[in-house]
Image: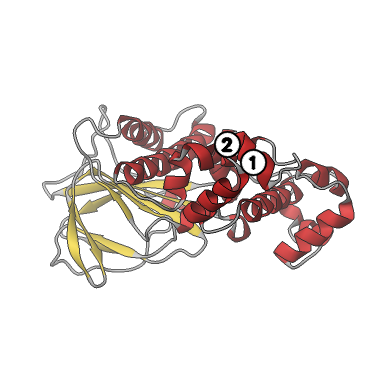
Amino acid sequence: MDVLSDVIAVMRTGRPRSALLTWHAPWGQRFAPVPGAAGFQVVLRGPCWLIRPDVDPVPLAVGDVLFQPHGRGHALADSPSTPVIAPACDPRDPAVAARTAVVDTIGVPVSGDDTPATVTLCGAYELEPGRTHPLLDDLPDLVHLPAHLGRNPELRAAVDLLAAELVRPRLGTDALVPALLDTLLLYLLRTWIDEQVAAGVSTGWAAALGDPVTGTALRAMHTDPARPWTVATLAAEAGLSRAPFARRFAALLGQPPLTYLTWWRMTLAARLLRESDVPLNVVAARVGYRSEFAFGTAFKRRYGTAPGRYRRSAPGQVGSAGAHSPLSTR
């Protein structure tokens, strides 16, 4: 299992939301913070401006992508001088999701008059707070991926496919949209990681995933979390001796390898408890604990409650979360 796919599989909960929104100049819209969600905006027709407090306005062009991993607020407008208004756009609201653009036969939004129009693709991923991967903590409040000719063709293709499904829903759209949203999120994260590596970042998750030693150890933990890993066996897997490996891992990620392994095991256990009816002893075995007691002690240390009580605290989620995502079936 590769690490990035696992990150998506465990951190998202519920069904992602998206909508196409059409704006007619003059316009200015404030998007309030959405706690517990990561959001994105893609400019499909424009241009427009990104407006944030204490930062100079940024011009946005067709194809530009904004990703907000921490659900912070921002505003978009046709001009930096246009006042912005509320209410905020929250794609998790069905009323917002119903506001789709009018399109012609070739998919170009039609304003209906001569007023300049901007069309944005707006979406949000609901996150499980206790399972949010530390990779997201490395991301800034807002990631701006400008559109350049020939740049990020896979990301652009995912955007186009998602927009087409929202514009012209057909048979299978209900299954395609959440799958395409997961795909879009993967491409967003992959693009950010690639750009960080290209810029020569020396610490953090982008550097760790690109490092042959640390990256190999992380993949080993994710592929077989139940294996009785030690620092020595992880070092051997990565092709380095114990002490240099431990130093390298801690220098890149700010924590020892077994600390991360325990966090990952508990995160997987929480997902199994909330999304399945697998017995506790089986959950314990799947995340590397030989006894249910040892597992329960470690789980309570992480989540402040016993595994059985954690499962009972959200009975409606068992067996349902992630049912629409091909990335969350593992």
Would you say the residues marked 1 and 2 are in contact, meaning their CB atoms lie under 8 Å apart? yes
Q: Residue 289 carries which label?
A: none
Quadrant of res 104: top left
Q: In which quarter of the image is the N terminus?
A: top right
Residue 215 located left or right of residue 66:
right
Q: Which of 69 and 98 is in front in this view?
A: 69
Measure the alpha-carbon separation of dots 1 and 2.
Answer: 6 Å
Quadrant of res 85: bottom left
The colouring scheme, among rainbow, by chain, secondary structure or one colour, is: secondary structure
Residue 128 located left or right of residue 79:
right
Q: Nearer the viewer, residue 288 or 185?
A: 288
Q: Mark 1 points at which residue?
A: 234
Q: In the rendered structure, which amino acid carries the disc numbered 1? A: Leu
For the residue labelled by badge 2, is the local secondary structure a helix, a strand or a loop? helix
Residue 314 pos. (x, y %): 73, 58
Which residue is at 49% across, 65% downward?
A: 35
Q: Name the residue under label 2.
A: 238
Residue 88 located left or right of residue 325:
left
The answer to whether residue 126 shows anywhere in this view is no
Residue 259 pos. (x, y %): 64, 56
Q: In the rendered structure, which amino acid carries the disc numbered 2? A: Ala
For the residue labelled by badge 1, is the local secondary structure a helix, a strand or a loop? helix
